[in-house]
Image (tube, rainbow, N blue to C red):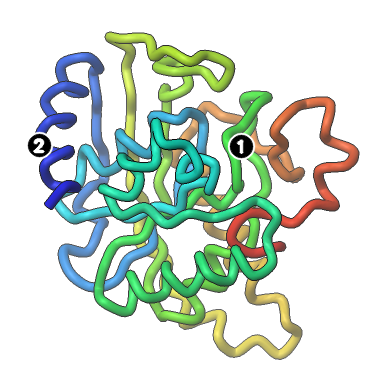
Amino acid sequence: MFYWFMKAILTPTLRGLYRVRVEGRSALPKTGPVILAANHRSFLDSLFLPLVLGRRVTFVAKAEYFDSKKTAWFFRGVGQIPIRREGGSASEGALAAATEVLESGGVFAIYPEGTRTRDGFTHRGHTGVARLALKTGAPIVPVGLVGTEECQPVDKKLPRFFRKVKIRFGAPIPPERYREDAEGLALRQLTDEVMFEIVQLCERYEYRDTYATKRAEDLPTELARVAPLLPA
């Protein structure tokens, strides 16, 4: 109930503050489990995506939001799943919760890059999205978010209003053709296909085959860290 209450408030508010254009929304199945896989450029991505969909969308959110009383009430109220960046058992728990959402016929959204881009590029995806799809059989709908970094850059606490945002949905990617995987490459191949489609939908953002980092200076060491949800 809280989710739909917040959506009823935020939808007209955000539409009044931003010029949102949606393309390909009909690609999203009206019923049944679906994984939305999007690029990640702004904190507001997790608001814009549910804004344009009639179905409830569940995300994973970093556990720090649940540790703070200032934000915990909101993320719990809208049914988000906490995940700690250390990986391990915390990531397994988030995967189990996401699986439950999908097995109940829900919509689960994930950012395969694992974190917001700091350098403006779209980065290599972690394989949690593929693992989830192969486990549940849910199709993956790639999503390109364009312009959200102009609404709230990663280094800014306050949003900027009256910017243009484009949200583009691609054709669903069925995981079935990756099930016969004699060489054990299915997770990476499916993830790469998803990221390729996301890049095509974004059009203007260049792709780099490196993992996104919290800070540009962390690049040499960040690749060794465990990614959110599941490691590549």
Residue 8: mark? 2
Query: In the image, what residue type sits under mark 2?
Result: Ala
Q: Which residue lies at the image location 33% right of the left edge and 24% below the top edge? A: 165
User: Is 44 rendered above or below residue 125?
Assistant: above
Query: In the picture provided, is 202 more to the left or to the right than 87?
Result: left
Residues 81 and 124: in front is 81
User: Is 197 rendered above or below residue 150?
Assistant: below
Query: In the image, what residue type sits under mark 1?
Result: Thr
Query: In the picture provided, is 68 more to the left or to the right than 123?
Result: left
Residue 103 location (% of width, % of height): 32, 79
User: Is 218 rendered above or below residue 24?
Assistant: above
Residue 166 location (% of width, % of height): 33, 29
Classify mark 2: helix, strand or loop.
Answer: helix
Q: Residues within 10 Å of mark 2 (few under 14, many from 20)?
A: few
Residue of label 1: 122
Residue 44 location (% of width, % of height): 39, 29
Classify mark 1: helix, strand or loop.
Answer: strand
Residues 56 and 168: in front is 56
Mark earlier in primary sequence (2, 1): 2
User: Is 113 rendered above or below residue 205?
Assistant: below
Residue 191 location (% of width, % of height): 59, 62
Res 10 → quadrant: top left
Q: Which residue lies at the image location 39% right of the left edge and 52% below the top edge? A: 59
